[in-house]
Every structure is written in structure tokens, then in C-alpha cells.
């Protein structure tokens, strides 16, 4: 047998082995695409990119412990302040992913809806378009289809899409009745109880203080979400934290800042866990954003609304709306996200849904033709 003939025999044999392998074995080295979307309710771009606000620290109306805030979060240099407040965003995402929304660096992302508060913002994030008819935060079933519902209708993602939120309106925003996407939010407990951790979380949920009637503590939301990731391994999960907005509405800059910092720590632990788990490691995209901005001066930072939104919400002393409420931010890291740091340009909140689908290597124009275009500048 000459060399060429021997080489042909070996090659043929290898091809036969590959053809005889089970389908799943042949695909074993192909990474699965997963997505984690996180929102931090009402967190301003000013803190994300500039750290703590000295004007608010020194305002007696909002800061009970200015000395503590200054010691732990204030530095003269802007980049040092933001690193103290959001260490994960600025040590990991800034070096391995992208951030959008630093208006001092010509990086802009704004809401498209005309209201500038929560339900319209979450609808825009999840559906890829603004709906003028969504003009309140009432518990109304969303007539619009979210990208979570789209994914839950695809065979590869069916029953592998979950959502967890601190605010009790999320089942209505995602329309869990129609979409089939399970939503654990507000003061909902895990049912059925499948793990020791979910049992413990149910007990904690019953015993924890109720600071607000419609929003639970973020640590409980985070606990339920992490339990699901560890034990159910969803392909797509949405986690919506809420404390920051409610502490801001309460006029407590101390608690708003502490909540933002705690959430960054949760994100750090989440990302480290994802990178340690074989199912998620190196094949999962993490996207982070917010539903709306808020006032950009001390007098109005506790609130957010457009002129029309102020009328709807009954904010009588803001007939022209609350400036800054339409200004948001966005961050992403993952295998299909370019490592670009702060990215200059102009984008809209309505582009997040298509970008989420594109990060999963799906075609958003086919799946959600009504949605705004993906932020292709971010993607490989």
C-alpha cells in the first residue's frame, strides 16, 4: 500500500467514525448561547460614569451621613469615584465589554417613549419599541410581545426562559399569562419548593421588612434568581432590581448609593459564578441597563417624568417634566460583545431587545420586525 492510498484509507475511516457518532456528541464542542439581562431601576448615568454626586452628599435634604459617604465613595478624580461605587462595571465590564451613556464623553443613549417612567421603559427595553398607550405603572397586561416571549416560543429556548423582579408589576409587563414565561416578582414565593435555598428564601421573604408595598428587597430577588441559575440552568434569564429607584423616591441619597453599590457586588458575584459554571462559562452574554433616568439637579433628582408623564403622575410642580429623566445607560459583556470600553455615539433604549437577540446569534429583524435595530456597533 503506497502512502497516498494509506492516507485515503485513514481519512475515510475518520469520516465514518464522525458520521456514526450521535448528533449530540458531534456538537459537544459548540458553545450554547445564553443571555442574562439585568436592570437597575432608576439609576442615573451621572453616578454610573461619575460616581457619587458631591452636591447631593452635601444637601441636608438627602444625605443623613455625609461623612460616611465622602469617606467611602468620594474622591477628587472622576474615574476613582466611579470605581469605588461600581467596582465590577469599571474593573471588568469596562475592560472586557462596552459601556454607553457617558454624556461627557459623547456617548448617548435615551428612552424613546414619551413618558419617562417605569412601565413604559421596561416595555421599551423588552419589546424594542415605545408604546404611547402604556401611560401608567398600573397592573395592566401588556398587549405587546417581549423578546422573552419570542424566545420562549422557539424550540431551543422553550421552557428555558425565566424572569425575576423586585417590583410586583413584572408579570403584567412580560404578560406571563400569554407568554408562558415564569415571573417571580414582588412578594411572590417559590412554588413548588425544589431546593433548600428556595425554602429558606420563602421563609426570609415572609419575615423580611416590607419597606414598600409593591417592591421587595433586592437580595431576595437575587437569591431566587441565583437559585434558578444553579438548579435549572435557563438559557435566558431577566433579573430586575428595584431598590435604587424607591430609595431615591424616598429622598435618601445614602440608601440609593448603598443599594447601587450592593447591586454592583451582586453583578460581580453573578458574573464570577457564570464563568465558573461549565454550562455558562464563555458562552453567556450579560447586559445591564435601566428603565429611565432621573432629575439632574438636587431639587429634582428624586423624581422622573416627561411633561406628559408629570401630568399622568400628578407632579404638579414640574409642568415641563423632569430634565434628565430620558437619559439612561447600557453595559454589556460576553463572547459576542466587543471589548471597547466607553463607546461614543447615539443609541436608543428601544435597541436593547434586538441587541439581546443578536447576542444569541439570532436574527432580530425576522423575529421582531417591529423592534428597533440592534446596536451592531457592539457586536462581533
Image (cartoon, helix red, strand yellow):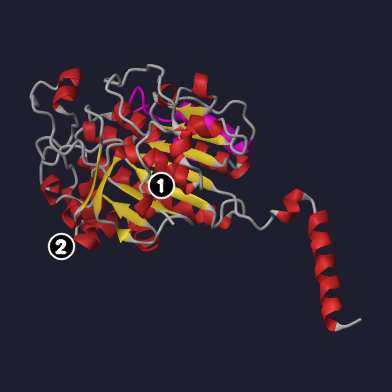
**Residue 64 in view here:** yes
> Mark 1 or mark 2, which has the lower sequence index?
2
**Residue matched to label 1:** 287
Q: Badges 1 and 2: C-beta atoms under 8 Å apart?
A: no
Q: Residue at x 40, y 23 (%)?
A: 144
Whether 3 is among the magenta residues is: no
**Residue matched to label 2:** 76
In the image, the segment drawn in magenta is 195-223
What numbered label is drawn on residue 176? none
The relative height of residue 255 versus residue 103 in the rendered view (above or below) is above
Whole-Å distance between the Cαs marked 1 and 2?
29 Å
Quadrant where the C terminus sits is bottom left
Q: Is residue 327 left or right of residue 192?
A: left
The relative height of residue 153 versus residue 257 in the rendered view (above or below) is above
In the rendering, at what x and y percent does residue 339 appear? 38, 61
In the rendering, at what x and y percent does residue 85 appear? 28, 54
Number of on-image labels: 2
Q: Residue at x 33, y 18 (%)?
A: 138
Amino acid at each position: 500500500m503506497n502512502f497516498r492510498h494509506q492516507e485515503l484509507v485513514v481519512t475515510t475511516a475518520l469520516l465514518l467514525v464522525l458520521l456514526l457518532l450521535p448528533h449530540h456528541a458531534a456538537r459537544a464542542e459548540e458553545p450554547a448561547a445564553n443571555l442574562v439581562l439585568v436592570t437597575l431601576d432608576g439609576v442615573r448615568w451621572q453616578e454610573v460614569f461619575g460616581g457619587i454626586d458631591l452636591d447631593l452628599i452635601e444637601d441636608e435634604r438627602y444625605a443623613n451621613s455625609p461623612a460616611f459617604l465622602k469617606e467611602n465613595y468620594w474622591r477628587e478624580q472622576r474615574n476613582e469615584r466611579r470605581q469605588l461605587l461600581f467596582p465590577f462595571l469599571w474593573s471588568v465590564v469596562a475592560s472586557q465589554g462596552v459601556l454607553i451613556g457617558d454624556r461627557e464623553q459623547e456617548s448617548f443613549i435615551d428612552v424613546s417613549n414619551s413618558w419617562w417612567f417605569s412601565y413604559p421603559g421596561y416595555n421599551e427595553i423588552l419589546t424594542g419599541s415605545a408604546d404611547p398607550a402604556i401611560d401608567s405603572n398600573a397592573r395592566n397586561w401588556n398587549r405587546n410581545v417581549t423578546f422573552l416571549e419570542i424566545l420562549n416560543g422557539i424550540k431551543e429556548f422553550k421552557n428555558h426562559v425565566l424572569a425575576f423582579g423586585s417590583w410586583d408589576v413584572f408579570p403584567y409587563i412580560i404578560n406571563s399569562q400569554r407568554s408562558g414565561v415564569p415571573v417571580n416578582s414582588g412578594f411572590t414565593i417559590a412554588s413548588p419548593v425544589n431546593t433548600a435555598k428556595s425554602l429558606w428564601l420563602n421563609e426570609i421573604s415572609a419575615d423580611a421588612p416590607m419597606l414598600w408595598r409593591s417592591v421587595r428587597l433586592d437580595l431576595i430577588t437575587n437569591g431566587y434568581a441565583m437559585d434558578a441559575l444553579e438548579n435549572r440552568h435557563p438559557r435566558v434569564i431577566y433579573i430586575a432590581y428595584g431598590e435604587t429607584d424607591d430609595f431615591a423616591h424616598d429622598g435618601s441619597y445614602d440608601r440609593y448609593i448603598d443599594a447601587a453599590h450592593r447591586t454592583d457586588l451582586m453583578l460581580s458575584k453573578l458574573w464570577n459564578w457564570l464563568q465558573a459554571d461549565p454550562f455558562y462559562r464563555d458562552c453567556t452574554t450579560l447586559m445591564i441597563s435601566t428603565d429611565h433616568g432621573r432629575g439632574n439637579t438636587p431639587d429634582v433628582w428624586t423624581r422622573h417624568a416627561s411633561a406628559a408623564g408629570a401630568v399622568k403622575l400628578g407632579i404638579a410642580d414640574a409642568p415641563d417634566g423632569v430634565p434628565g429623566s430620558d437619559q439612561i445607560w447600557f453595559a454589556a459583556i460576553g463572547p459576542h460583545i466587543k471589548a471597547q470600553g466607553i463607546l461614543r455615539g447615539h443609541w436608543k433604549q428601544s435597541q436593547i431587545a434586538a441587541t439581546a437577540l443578536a447576542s444569541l446569534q439570532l436574527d432580530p429583524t425576522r423575529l421582531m420586525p417591529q423592534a428597533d435595530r440592534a446596536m451592531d456597533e457592539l457586536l462581533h
